[in-house]
Amino acid sequence: MFCFRLTAYAVTFVLWIMAPASAAQVEACFVPGQDCTAVVVREIDGARHEVLVQAYGFTSIPIADALISAKDRGVTIRAIFDKSDRPKEG
């Protein structure tokens, strides 16, 4: 199981990409200082079966595009977002 944690602008984005236990690796990425978006996009691009996303806030266009591409490849995408990230009605 791969785990990537991206923390930027007081937003925590946790992404789990399921893989065989024999291939398990963990990589940490921190901002400022590293290009965490590129790390997350690279792993989504390599997903073959399932991507699980949990995010308090989500605004990354490159990550959204990678998730859409993965979905188009037949990868199952499941996401949990905080309700405070929904557009306001009215």
Image (tube, helix red, strand yellow):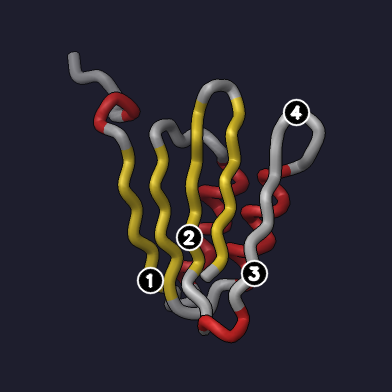
Dot 2 or dot 4, earlier in sequence: 2
Dot 3 or dot 1, earlier in sequence: 3
Would you identify the image quadrant in which residue 35 lies? Answer: top right
Left or right of 75? Residue 29 is right
Name the quarter where the C terminus is drawn.
top left
Work out how far the residue at label 1 is from the one at label 4, CA to CA, in angstroms. Answer: 31 Å
User: With respect to residue 46, does 6 lie above or below?
Assistant: above
Helix, strand or loop for disc 4: loop
Amino acid type of the residue that numbered disc 4 sits on in the rendered structure: Pro
Residue occupied by mark 1: 76
Q: Residues within 10 Å of mark 4 (few under 14, many from 20)?
A: few
Residue in view at x 38 percent, y 64 percent: 77
Dot 3 or dot 2, earlier in sequence: 2
Amino acid type of the residue that numbered disc 3 sits on in the rendered structure: Gln
Q: Nearer the viewer, mark 1 or mark 4?
A: 4
Residue occupied by mark 4: 32
Residue 29 spot, x, y in % from top left: 70, 45
Mark sitting on residue 25: 3
Would you identify the image quadrant in which residue 9 lies? Answer: top right
**Extreme-top residue of the structure:** 90
